Amino acid sequence: GVCAYVRTLLFLYLSRPEIWVDSRTIYIGHKEPPPGAEAYIPQRFPDNRIVSSKYTFWNFIPKNLFEQFRRIANFYFLVIFLVQLIIDTPTSPVTSGLPLFFVITVTAIKQGYEDWLRHKADCSINECPVDVVQRGKVVRTQSHKLRVGDIVMVREDETFPCDLILLSSSRPDGTCYVTTASLDGESSHKTYYAVPDTMAFRTEQEVDSLHATIECEQPQPDLYKFVGRINIYKDREEPVARTLGAENLLLRGATLKNTQYIYGTVAVYTGMETKMALNYQSKSQKRSAVEKSMNAFLIVYLFILISKAVINTVLKYAWQWSPDRDEPWYNHRTENERQRHVVIRAFTDFLAFMVLFNYIIPVSMYVTVEMQKFLGSYFITWDEEMFDDELGEGAQVNTSDLNEELGQVEYVFTDKTGTLTENNMEFIECCVDGNVYIPHAICNGQILSAASSIDMIDSSPGGYRREHEDLFFRALCLCHTVQVKEEETVDGIKRGIHQGRPTSFYISSSPDEVALVEGMKRLGYTYLRLKDSYMEILNKDDEIERFQLLHVLNFDSVRRRMSVIVKSSSGDYLLFCKGADSSIFPRVVSGKVEQVRARVEQNAVEGLRTLCVAYKKLSESEYQEACHHLTEAKLALQDREQRLAHAYDIIEREFVLLGATAVEDRLQEKAADTIESLHKAGMKVWVLTGDKMETAAATCYASKLFRRSTQILELTKKRTEEQSLHDVLFELNRTVIRQRSMSGLSVDCLDFGLIIDGATLSAVLKPNQEGAGNGNYREIFLEICRNCSAVLCCRMAPLQKAQIVKLIKASKEHPITLAIGDGANDVSMILEAHVGIGIMGKEGRQAARNSDYAIPKFKHLKKILLVHGHYYYIRIAELVQYFFYKNVCFIFPQFLYQFFCGFSQQPLYDTAYLTLYNISFTSLPILLYSLVEQHVSMETLKREPTLYRDIAKNSLLRWPVFLYWTCLGVFDAVIFFFGAYFLFDNTTFTSNGQMFGNWTFGTLVFTVLVFTVTLKLALDTHHWTWINHFFIWGSLLFYVIFSLLWGGIIWPFLNYQRMYYVFMQMLSSGPAWLSIILLITVSLLPDVIKKVLCRSMCPTATERAQVGVGETADFTFQPLYDPIDE
Amino acid sequence: MMASSYNAKEEDGPHSGTPGLGGAAVTKSKKPDNTAFKQQRLVAWQPILTAGTVLPAFFVIGIFFIPIGIALFVTSNNIKEFEIDYTGVDADSPCYSCAKDFSWNSTTSCTCSVDFKLEQPFESNVFMYYGLSNFYQNHRRYVKSRDDSQLYGDLSALTNPSKECEPYRTSNGLPIAPCGAIANSLFNDTLELYYVDSNGTRKEIPLVKKGIAWWTDKHVKFRNPGGNDNLTVSFEGNSKPVNWRKAVYELDPTDSENNGFINEDFIVWMRTAALPTFRKLYRIIQKKSSNTATLPSGNYVLEITYNYPVLSFDGRKRMILSTISWMGGKNPFLGIAYLTVGSICFFLGVVLLIIHHKYDTRNTSADIPS
């Protein structure tokens, strides 16, 4: 689907200059506008068919093959296969064709199956029934038949079939409630509004009589943005234009709730142009460090392969310079061959050598790696410890490509709210003009007697104060976007009647708001509901106050505040605003700023989240002016965002400060423990938050990110205002370097914590600073960061979070970064980091959806990194190294054999062995190893996070290690080949004097090879479960049985019978057995010695931990002979 | 990559109006199973290769390998082997003229005889080999130049041999049987062995020509087309290989069980050697009685019918006489290798013991505080 979609988009994008228009016009009910109004240009829109499938029945094979061969590895094998088909090569095309065919078929079947599932899902979606209003009647049709302009009727609990503009709803106020849980994970009910001119429509006929057009922007994926305009034509009058925004647009995938039915038009986008479909774009592919090393190794091997082929070709022509060697009397060429030009012959020989040695880059490695990643990722989803009962969900794997990257993380960037902290807000106190109010009884949802719940510190009831107090509480009751949800109805009976009042709970996308409104409830001011644009409040005296809600100036992260304009029952226009202190104080003209500021700062230090509340009284004319600004901005089709921001800026001015609130955000369970473990594991933890410095720092202390001993370095706006940025940076740098040189070797004794805020950060990152020496603070900043164990970045905009991640990623060590967050504001950094982890939090599912892995809680990070990441890394590292090793072992003897067969490309092994070596004889043990290996027990990994340092910086895939494995492979290959060579050299092998031929020679080498390579893996296995036993011994047994069978029959379909009885004859010879045992022993010996020596001389922490475990675990191999302990 | 596409799928799926009430049942099934496999807690044996655990293994290998090595070495040393090069490279060698004057077209065969002396008697059965050097039987072009179907007695392959046999596929328009380079270059020297008495009389030593090929080759893999009788008729439509002096049905006219494709000399030749210097079993000299040596020490004469040219490619021909033990022919390599590896393992065992003593105590003591 994605692919098809991307192509469509691309097409649209490319063809933009000609046919692309910024807006589209939709004719509701396909009615032409009245003549003269505007030209009727019927635009063509796609139908409402959702196509997430990639292939159709007809194009599956060509398209799938094309896609598969676009992968460089598959293409390489295809080329080899074609070379084998075209020229006369030593091995039959089957040897590379069969594995390739196998791989391609398996992949094709998998993709085909997935696509079939998609087809099925598409079908069920496309064919699901939809009610459409046609000619005044409701007609039932299928979803995919919907066209842009159709009028659709949706009933309660139905999902919207496409993006709709709400015309009218069964609710009299023209609203409807919608849950977008399946789109962005927010389970709260959002209110959508009907177009005011049509909201009165109640019947199909009425709706059908509507004559209107809608102009709106072209499809774009932002779920929360929509700009459009509806023109309603009424009897030859000028059309009435109404602005349409995101609050009018019902998105496909969302579900209608608490509303009987609605009429909407298929106004905007259908099929693949719906916002839902647009949001299922593939993210950019992330590649793991292991994959990069693998590709580097591959290039080395490709180089080795080519040089082998070149060497052999050159030697061949040098060797056969004399014609008696080239063509001795017993071995003539055919006439055809003789006539070929020598250059062509040489080239053909080069290709033939390439084909002969091509197994050094095995096709099966890719398959095995892919299978390992795919199957291995199930262990994450299956992990019970990462299952959260409360949420009812376990960890999710969105991409299995990065499993091993979890074991390589060096920097952890974490969001604070909802990630480190619970995002379970609790109202702690509020302060009005410096007087503090604390609701002391904390009873969730229970309403206490209003009078007793207010603890007034200063109880002198001055008129001025009283007025502010009233305004403050009303401000908090009115200035929010909270919805009231009444108890679900069961069996038609409203159960919500409780103590004479309906019990209800508040829902909002911001938990702070809920906490505030609930806090107000405890202080005696209950927000009841929003009804017909009147907000109802139950005040302390149990009176209902009604305010007409005129405008909501929504919250955004740039302004960091929100406002409402209401009209009180006395007819006053009031603007209430609440927001971050930094965004409120500059706009305040009166009020007890100093007292409030002091209180806010005090609360912030204690780790509380603070908000300031202010108000402004508007005169009639001021209100009209504000109205004018807002409607103008809202009606704009272009740059609406900017215009709105500008309008808000004009309106939100000259406030009177009322007070501040404090809400506590509790730390997540085991957050401190997790951070400590990450620190011990050598990771640097950075907290990136939009919160203010004091609050964030408090959280950092609470979560042990900063410890008492941590020396805090501040790089904040406050400081840079006093000194220049340049001086501050250099001073900090000097401090860090001095301390480091003083502390000398013991780095642990002093650690630094850095606090930087968004403003300073952008100053630091700004390119081309003037007067900054070389004009780049970046390096100095990075240098400071490198020496800090913890960094706190506060006041971060979402994009800045990504910038930080990018900065670290691009620094000269190229560390592996991990970003973890739970909210939409973390998505950018989650996408930017090497590994993005989403927390299935309260702020919706966006982070989890865009992440590579999603976990329920922050504490699960410990297990996913320290245990799963560690395991995956050692598993895949072994897998990659082992694959190269076993193919060196496999191919190098063939290379050596060329020196003894006149460089004639004679293969050492039989075709069946060549083909099956990587497919079946040696593939399963390593795959299973790479799925179940545990070199250290899970408990040890969790208990000792320092073990994570052992695998840091891709340590198992560095060049020395790779070289060691390759050398080991070459050594083993030399042992195999020359071992067999000296045994075969001019002597008899059997007790009846009969001689063996070249195929027995090859089979002997091959048998030693298969056993050695499998036993090498057995030596590396630290965790022998029945699975390992089964597959290791099973594949050896399979080899033996296969060989017996392969040589046991005259195969009628083969044109050669060279393997007939070869294996059995070999086994009937005593020296063959003895030499097999000898050669296996010799091949394995160096590796065992290396292992033992390394372990004894300089054991790594992991190796010590293994031994430590060995003394306690039940199933451990106890040393048989241990004179020291006795 | 795979996982992502699946997850995307789940979210794409029809959310067609399932109210939240069913949620509890769904979440229950989401909980992962607490099985040992899924939780990666399978019962496992966790061996660790430490000096302590490997030590015994090294000693065991040493203890096993050294006796085996000694046994192999002694056995190999007890095997009697005699080898003589009769190529005739040097002017003073008996076959010099045969070698020099070789011509493919000569109708008369050149014979020469080589005298040699066995210093020690050969007690048990003696196996007579011919050996060729610098002969690339393992050259790819050569190895594949055969038709196993034809040799299996397949009639269609007889009249239409495999393309692989080119350029030895047809001759004078007739398909060659047996086709291919291997068959074409069949070794066709005849070797005869005479014992020379102390009084100078020659006594021919009986050479057994059966039992030199693999049983399975002779009885299964190689078959004459249309049975072993009337080979002349069976091969009527075929031409003999170009370098052969006689047709395939004339290889051993005296014995129909050893003629045609199932001629053992032919079968032995058809099993291509692994290396350019090789030997092939030619004849067996069976021990006649327990009290006399098969080949007593003394003087012998090897009579050679010199048909096979090797000088053109700088090759050598040898005749080898060898006794055989349970471990085959003379091969000191295996015994020496076993002895060496056994000793190395033993030595390593000692080294490891020292290392183990030195380091592991240090490590364990260092570990205790942590």
Image: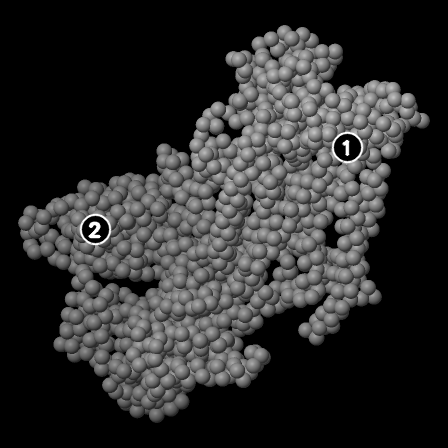
Residue A960 horizontal side relative to residue B56, left or right: left
- Dot 2 falls on a residue whose secondary structure is helix
Given contact means CB atoms under 8 Å apart, are the residues at marks 1 and 2 in contact? Answer: no
Name the residue that disc number 2 marks: A16
User: Which chain contains the residue that carries disc 1?
Assistant: B
Measured as percent of width and height from the top left, residue A515 is found at 40, 73
Residue at x 62%, y 20% (from the top left corner): B103
Measured as percent of width and height from the top left, residue A915 is found at 56, 37
Q: Is residue B264 visible?
A: no
Rendered view: A196 above or below B123 = below
Which is in the foreground here, disc 1 or disc 2? 1
Badge 1 density bin: few <14, some 14–19, many ≥20, Cα 10 Å: some
Measured as percent of width and height from the top left, residue A829 is found at 40, 65
Residue at x 82%, y 64% (from the top left corner): A1123
Q: Is residue A85 visible?
A: yes
Name the residue that disc number 1 marks: B83
Q: Which mark is residue B144?
A: none
Residue closest to the eye, A921 or A939: A921
Q: Residue furthest front?
A: B91
- Dot 1 falls on a residue whose secondary structure is strand
Q: Amino acid at mark 2?
A: Arg
Q: Amino acid at mark 1?
A: Glu
The quadrant of the rendering that contains the N terminus of chain A is top left
The quadrant holding residue A247 is: bottom left
Rendered view: A236 above or below A515 = above
Residue closest to the eye, A1092 or B81: B81
Labels 1 and 2 within one chain: no
